[in-house]
Image: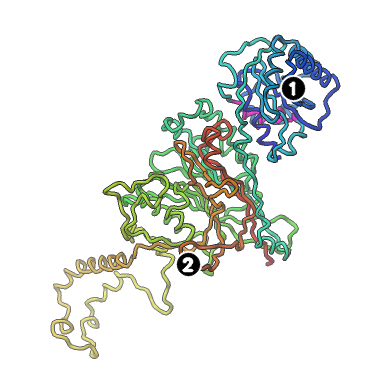
Amino acid sequence: TDAFFTYRKNVLLAKSPSTQIEGVFAATTGRSVPEEQEALLQQWLEEGVGHLPASEGVPAVRKVSVTLTSDWLEGSELLMTSLSDLNTSPEVTPCADQQHSQLNALASSELQDHAVAELARLPSEETVAVAGSAPWAAVVPQTDHQTAGCAGINVEVLNDDPAVLAWGLSCDAETVPAVLPAHPIQDAVPFYPVPTEVPYHEILWRDWEDLSVQPCVLEQVSKNTPLFEFRVMSYNILAQDLVEQGLDLYVHCHPDILSWNYRLPNLLQEIQHWDPDVLCLQEVQENHYWEQLEPTFKEMGFECFYKRRTGTKTDGCAVCYKHSRFQLISLSPIEYFRPGLDVLNRDNVGLVLLLQPVLPEGLGLKAVSPLCVANTHVLFNPRRGDIKLAQVALLLAEIDKIARTAEGSYYPVILCGDLNSVPDSPLYKFIRNGELSYHGMPAWKVVSGQEDFSQQLYSRKLLAPLWPSSLGVTDKCQYAALCQPKKLGRREYSRDFLLQFRFCDVACERPPQLVLLEGVTDAKPVASAREHSDVTAVPKRHNSLSLLDKQCSGVIQHGLNLTSVYSHFLPQRGRPEVTTMPMGLGATVDYIFYSAEPVESKAGKCRRLYKDGALKLLGRLSLLSEDVLLMANGLPNPFCSSDHLCLLASFGLEISSL
């Protein structure tokens, strides 16, 4: 079904603009059609072959199914149309007699010979699009492994699926002419030359990688230990306001595919197809969220939470989960902006949720651990790695607070987001290895890979401490108020309470065991000391804070033990994975991290190794390489409606007995 999903979308992408009458001319194997249609098509082919030179032949078309529509609904309306309405609508499904008459008109057209000749020149595994007042998309069955098993599917289902029809809202201007005749389909149908480029579904094909055969998962299966399986998607969907503010970044795109009315059905179709249980979105425009996305997601069974960026920004982050699979325990939105702090002066945000998986009925006395899900979008500016690092540290401190158990351990954690940092950057290594020595490091290097500013004479360098202690976050990425150990058997008194006794008789007496030092221990409090007591107390407190700051060694740590779902390299292609294509340059900046157990290795601290623990990685949707995306004209394109690729992973949580 995944193969057919992309296979049929390519058919629709080859069609004309939405104002034209639509049709699908698709070749399939192993499919029975009415004898009248088969005989008519065979006659048409034989007549065409008779007019061709002997050296030219017609490729094997096998049996062909034809489905026509006499009207076209707008994509946003059609997406919300039920299947039953489409099946019963007389405008969408013409009768068989109309199809026969339309085929007769097509067979008797004056340009029949030219069309057959054009078809004969193409290889048997190419996609052919023939345009006219009733454009056709002829697809010869593929023998490639990606589409194996798809050709036998009933192609008439194409026009019964409203979500799929929404993919045809826009069309490349090169496929069909700008002006088409408005006469009915029974009239002569002109044929136009068609570009023979590789179809989108073949270029942007993404395989599902089954990782359930790894040893740790097989061990669970051998022990008959059940797993709570769920899917997590992370997706930067490209806010429309950001598109309009930076149109120079999308000069390679046709204006039609950048419109929100075109992109929204594509994005919803993609999310609905992969059917995640937890959905983490970035660059979600606020008005689109409340007016369109949240109502649609609720109809799909999601519970949704949104956090807009602070300041005047119009987009933010959203986390949605299937309420049939999870229940909310706690929600913690994060604002990274801190007034007066240069290292936290940007408007980025994040969300941290603690979810309780809902076990199916009939399992008896079983329990599964809560799951902590975090989503964020970190600052883009390549020169301000110090801000990125501080934002990530603040996010990890919030995760530490939400995911920490009463025993001091952590619930399983899944961290999603657009971190605007590449896999070989110090920021990525800090998240994965749990430690980073940043003192003296150039700020741009923290996000190395986006841009290289090594030639600058006066680049900003990171100094310790990166943030003041007044922020309340330690160099272990924990809130100071939560990580200070309490001393048992010791009473705690406030400073104001103790100051009440500074001039009492007991305080003015010198203890007998105190060594007498002239000028030091022989002095007694006098009345003048009252006037200066409050003044002298302030610098002492300030000095204590400055001593804490001096203890910072320029090393930050965290103890969450996170590793990436993706390896960031495609061994079969020998190229790195990419998740986005800014200015035509591929890069990986989107991630899904998850909790794992560290493994001792001889490699030392340079790269920590992990194995799956209670949270197991079962599968993932493969990414693409830069050269592949360049073949599809980068991102976004008619097939992918964001400048980022979605990330998708399948996990399993151990189910234990109470």
Tell me the tag on residue 8: none
Alpha carbons under labels 2 and 1: distance apart: 64 Å
Dot 2 amino acid type: Gly
Q: Residue at x 74, y 30 (%)?
A: 157
Vertical position of residue 358 compared to residue 193: above or below? below
Look at the image and give the residue range highlighted in magenta: 155-169
Q: Position of residue 152 (x, y in %)?
A: 77, 34
Dot 1 amino acid type: Val
Residue hosting label 2? 604
Q: Earlier in the sequence, mark 2 or mark 1?
A: 1
Magenta span: chief secondary structure = helix
Q: Position of residue 244 (x, y in %)?
A: 44, 30
Task: Tell me if mark 1 has few (under 14), some (14-19) or many (20+) residues whose alpha carbon lies within 10 angstroms of its own.
Answer: some
Question: Does residue 164 belong to the magenta stretch?
Answer: yes
Residue hosting label 1? 58
The reply, left or right, for residue 327 in relation to residue 408 is right
Indicate which label's residue lies in the foreground, 2 or 1.
Answer: 1
Q: Residue at x 41, y 64 (%)?
A: 481
Residue 181 is drawn in which quadrant? top right
Outermost right residue: 35
Outermost bottom residue: 512
The reply, left or right, for residue 291 in relation to residue 342 is right
Q: Residue at x 64, y 59 (%)?
A: 653
